[in-house]
Amino acid sequence: MLFWFHSYDVLWENRASIHVGKGSQNDVSDAKVWLEPQIEVARAGRTLNSSELSLALRIIEQNLKRILEAWNAHKNKTN
């Protein structure tokens, strides 16, 4: 399972988000998860089954502080 940020999201969206998938980073097929104001699935995608998506959400929840720090670092680097 891969987790990544999209620079497009950083530049054009007001909410922090992370993408989750398997294999290559494919925005159309992979899941997108809002990180704020609470963790919420923005798009389930097609690469993860429901148990994998649930696991991804647990991983995000357990690491939310670190993920948001990385998001903000990416945002500062991108802007």
Image (tube, helix red, strand yellow):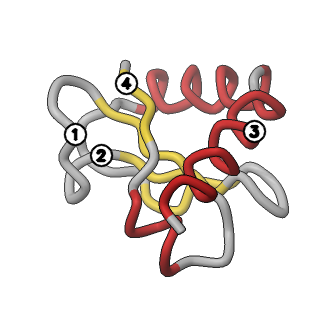
Q: What distance separates the C-alpha of mark 4 from that of mark 1? A: 8 Å
| Residues packed near mark 2 inside 10 Å, few (<14), some (14 to 19) or many (20 plus) | many
**Do the CB atoms of the residues marked 4 and 1 lie less than 8 Å apart?**
yes
- Identify residue for label 1: 25
- Select label 4 or label 3 by which is in front: 3
Q: What distance separates the C-alpha of mark 4 from that of mark 2? A: 10 Å
- Identify residue for label 4: 2
**Do the CB atoms of the residues marked 4 and 2 lie less than 8 Å apart?**
no
The secondary structure type at the circle numbered 2 is loop
Left or right of 70, for residue 6: left
Label 1 sits on what residue type? Gln
Label 2 sits on what residue type? Asp
| Residue 53 coordinates in the image, percent (x, y) | 49, 32
- Select label 3 or label 1 by which is in front: 3
- Identify residue for label 3: 69
The secondary structure type at the circle numbered 1 is loop
- Identify residue for label 2: 30
Q: What distance separates the C-alpha of mark 3 from that of mark 2? A: 22 Å
